[in-house]
Image: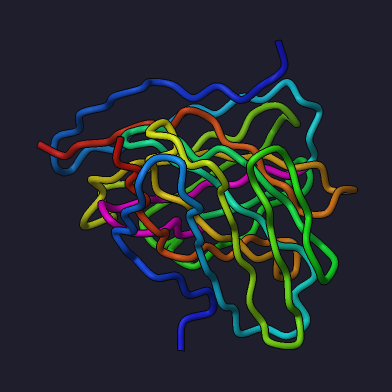
């Protein structure tokens, strides 16, 4: 089955720790995205990548880092510099040749203890 | 002014009624518009895409786009309790999607 997978589903972090969220897709999509969602709010773009080995900052990139070494994978690291990391993190992908439809993975809920 | 605005709701409609969800956007050059449905605790699911002025129907869902007035709407006919969710409007700007805050819909049996 084609789709987007994210792991883990739930993640707990102590203050001062870095954590990495996994995102994998087998849709052969060129573009991948990371969003953050806080309760009662819309989605805010953290980072996006339109091609392997290239990525751009979104609206709230401070305290986060990404890599895009393979087309299928776009991991997100939440660093200790991110002061309020507790949120629902969503990964999405889209075909670069398409018209912008994005499809989402199931999400990772991160809680800082 | 927010780039994409939606009424936060909650919008409550009785079962079988038509639910009307509205969205306005600020960037006149936007060409692609999307509606996502998000159940509580789940990720957004794409339900409608629209690119041209007018109406686009898919089952019980109709998306309406008016580029001159910069608004896009979603109508849900014969609303069901299973339609209760938050509906997110998204507008494509330069290859990135800009999301509204979402409208919470509650369909009462």
Q: Is residue B1 above or below residue A46?
A: below
Q: Magenta region, mostly helix, strand or loop? A: strand
Q: Does the magenta segment cover residue B67?
A: no
The foreground one among A78 and A87 is A87
Residue at image point 30% right, 35% down: B109
Residue at image point 62% right, 41% down: B46
On the image, the x and y values in percent for residue A91 come to 53, 38
Residue at image point 65% right, 66% down: B91
The foreground one among B8 and A94 is B8
Q: Is residue B19 above or below residue B23?
A: above
Farthest top residue?
A1
Does residue A85 show up?
yes
- Kindly indicate the quadrant of the structure image that contains residue A9: top left
Horizontal relation, residue B59 to residue A66: left or right: right
Q: Does the magenta segment cover residue A42?
A: yes
- Kindly indicate the quadrant of the structure image that contains residue A73: top right
Residue at image point 83% right, 54% down: A99
Position of the C terminus of chain A by quadrant:
top left
Magenta-tinted stretch: A31-45
On the image, the x and y values in percent for residue B68 come to 76, 87
Position of the N terminus of chain A by quadrant:
top right
Does residue A20 show up?
no
On the image, the x and y values in percent for residue A39 come to 25, 52
How many marks the image carries: the answer is 0
Farthest right residue?
A97
Horizontal relation, residue A13 to residue A79: left or right: left
The foreground one among A32 and B90 is B90
């Amino acid at each position: 089955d084609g789709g987007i997978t994210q792991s883990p589903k739930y993640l707990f972090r102590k203050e001062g720790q870095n954590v990495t969220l996994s995102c994998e897709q087998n849709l052969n999509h060129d573009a991948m995205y990371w969003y953050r969602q806080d309760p009662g709010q819309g989605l805010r773009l953290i980072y996006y990548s339109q091609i392997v080995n290239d990525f751009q900052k979104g609206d709230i990139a401070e305290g986060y880092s990404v890599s895009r070494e393979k087309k299928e994978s776009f991991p997100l690291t939440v660093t200790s510099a991110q002061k309020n990391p507790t949120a629902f993190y969503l990964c999405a992908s889209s075909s670069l040749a398409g018209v912008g439809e994005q499809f989402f993975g199931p999400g990772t809920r991160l809680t800082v203890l | 002014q927010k780039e994409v605005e939606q009424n936060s709701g909650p919008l409550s409609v009785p079962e079988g009624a038509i639910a009307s969800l509205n969205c306005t956007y600020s960037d006149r050059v936007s060409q692609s518009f999307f509606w996502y449905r998000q159940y509580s605790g789940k990720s957004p699911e794409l339900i409608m895409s629209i690119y041209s002025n007018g109406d686009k129907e898919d089952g019980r869902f109709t998306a309406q786009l008016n580029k001159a007035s910069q608004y896009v709407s979603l109508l849900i006919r014969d609303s069901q309790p299973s339609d209760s969710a938050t509906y997110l409007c998204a507008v494509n700007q330069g290859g990135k999607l800009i999301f509204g805050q979402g409208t919470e819909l509650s369909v009462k049996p």
